[in-house]
Amino acid sequence: MSAGARFVVRRLLRGLVTMWFAVTVTFFLLRLLPGDPALAVADPTMTEELRADLLRDYGLDRPLAVQYWEYLTQLAQGNLGVSFRQNQPVLDILLERLPWTLLLAGSALVVTVVLGIPLGVLAATRARGAVDRLIQIGGITGQSLFVPSVGVFLLYVFGVQLGILPIGGAMDDDVYGLAAYGSIAAHLVLPCLSLALVQLGSYVLTLRSTLIDALGEDYCTLARAKGLPNRRVVWRHALRNALLPTTTLVGLQLGFLVGGAVLTESIYAYPGVGRAIFEAVGQLDFPVLQGAFLMLAFAVIVANLLTDLAYGLLDPRVRTS
Amino acid sequence: MTEILEKGTTPAALPPSESVGRQTWQAFRRNPLGLASAAVLLLLGLVALAAPLIADYPSGYGEDVLASPSGAHWFGTDDLGRDVFAQVVWGTRVSIVVGLAASLLAIVIGVLVGVLAAYFRPADLVLGIIVDVSLSLPVLPLMILVAALAGPSVPTLVVVIALFSWPEVARVVRSQGLAVVPMPYVAAAHVVGGSHLWVIRKHVLPGVAPVVAVSVVLTTSRAVLSEAGLSFLGLGDPNSWSWGTILHQAQRSGSLATAWWTTLFPSLAILLLVVATTLLAVAYNDARNPRTR
């Protein structure tokens, strides 16, 4: 097998192991927690007999290993159970919501990178100067922001006081065609900005330090010695190499990004998976909570896999390491 | 015998640890940002301790509903007329207690796993995979699921947050431990017949102690953010106030966007605590590192 194929197989296996781990943790947490799963399904006034029936219906009277196998096979077929409150398969509910979460998280990621690269370059090329200090302090503060606080602040300023952007939802009901896209974009601005601001700090700080390291490398000294303009050394030589570890960090932080999306969607009533979680918490709808975690974990794992494979194509060092 | 060898294996160039501690403190004292952060944290700690002396416990109903900040109500009142200043003061207590307790629990688990992984190579493979894999999963939705199932309370929050925060600690401790374990003095400690437990206690743990110190600070601030997130979503302890609970109440009542004071002050409190802990960790790292001292 070639090195490239081995790399792809290894990454696929890794993704599978991660998903299996997420599923197994979920299964055992649900079964081992104090509190009878049957209590969660039914009200406490039911008779002992009815409860036994219920346990049998849900297969909860069988040995743990059997239940575990059953759980795995059901999940493999895409069966996430039925919502307690909406009497609808959890998968259907969540699939309807997933595109909005992907749109929100994806656009926030793009904004983070688009704003983060110039800021990181600015800080690294003026290392230890006043601008650098400012960006560093801003980065640390940004890392410390609480997503709902940022969300409420932006909502108050741009939605309530200035009234230039919608305060909630994902689009207006009565628009079609091009206007619909405009409406979606207008509704996306504030949630996306809230999420991007929270991500930006660590992105800029990491890019700054890797870029400073790269600028000290021999190949940059050589490029300067050859008389290349500084701008070209920074953007063409150093940045290319600094972006790789930085983007690896983005991959590692995808889980954090998804957590931020859950909070952001709750603030803006944005109809994604996060908002479904927020509603399910209020209604104690456990199948939806469980399904939402598994679906978000799956999305993160697939995104990680895709970025890893893309790197493998771009950077030969990744393939061989 | 072991005493002598132990002294013998310490290179003469390394000063005894008290003076390293003193040098760190000397450097730290010259950093205004670090001192300011320490002062802020001390102040928040005092507020948490002295909450009953500062404000009455916010409960029941007040007469002024959604009043903006004034002399009588410094931070205004919420939709039931309760004083927001009192909520923030009492919230400091729960937020800090949950943050600290969850962080300490996570540190204990994380250090144990991290040291084991660095010390016993076969364990490293399994533990390493577990840590890697759990770091790449979206933790907040998982915390939400478990907290919702276990029922909201302060102990639930502590355990749930700790349960999903230790892999980060384990990762940091493990990588530092991997640098300490192959050191000649660790090998020498084995040669003189030291048991595994003794070597870990006397040599490996002191070697990873500095990163653990930083970890305590950073894990606490992350735990405070996690607590705020869970409480904001309605999974906080219904019988006590925390900063996230104040935001949750504001969201639930619909005053989130109109009565800015119900959200601004708890938000500022969270920001203050997290920024101060982060800066403290940065300042400590700088002070400890001879190159940046």
Image (spheres, grey):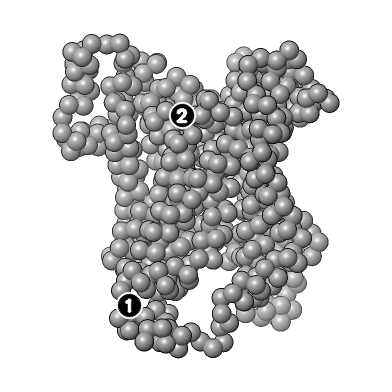
Judging from the image, what secondary structure is the residue with disc 1 in? loop
Judging from the image, what secondary structure is the residue with disc 2 in? loop
Give above or below for A124 relative to B226. Answer: below
Q: Chain of mark 1?
A: B
Task: Report whether B2 appears left or right of B230.
Answer: left
Q: Report if residue A150 is visible in the image.
A: no
Determine the residue located farthest toward the right in the rendered image.
B71
| Amino acid under disc 1 | Gly
| Amino acid under disc 2 | Pro
Q: Chain of mark 2?
A: B
Q: Quadrant of the C terminus of chain A?
A: bottom left
| Foreground pick, A74 / A9 | A74
Residue B194's disc is: 1
Give above or below for B118 relative to A178. Answer: below
Residue A5: x %, y % from top left: 33, 61
| Foreground pick, B65 / B282 | B65
In the image, are marks 2 and 1 on the same chain? yes
Question: What residue appears at the point 59 percent right and 29 percent down from the top-left corner?
Answer: B241
Crowding at dot 2, Cα within 10 Å, few <14 / some 14-19 / many 20+, comes out as some
Question: What residue appears at the point 69 percent right and 34 percent down from the top-left corner?
Answer: B53
Earlier sequence position, callout 2 versus callout 1: 2
Task: Report whether B71 appears left or right of A280.
Answer: right
Question: What residue appears at the point 81 percent right and 23 percent down from the top-left corner?
Answer: B72
Residue A141: x %, y % from top left: 69, 49
Residue B152's disc is: 2
Q: Give the alpha-carbon distance from disc 2 to disc 1, as whole Å.
A: 47 Å
Q: Quadrant of residue B159?
A: top left
Task: Report whether A57 appears left or right of A251.
Answer: left
Q: Quadrant of residue A109?
A: top right
Crowding at dot 1, Cα within 10 Å, few <14 / some 14-19 / many 20+, comes out as some
Residue A183: x %, y % from top left: 65, 24
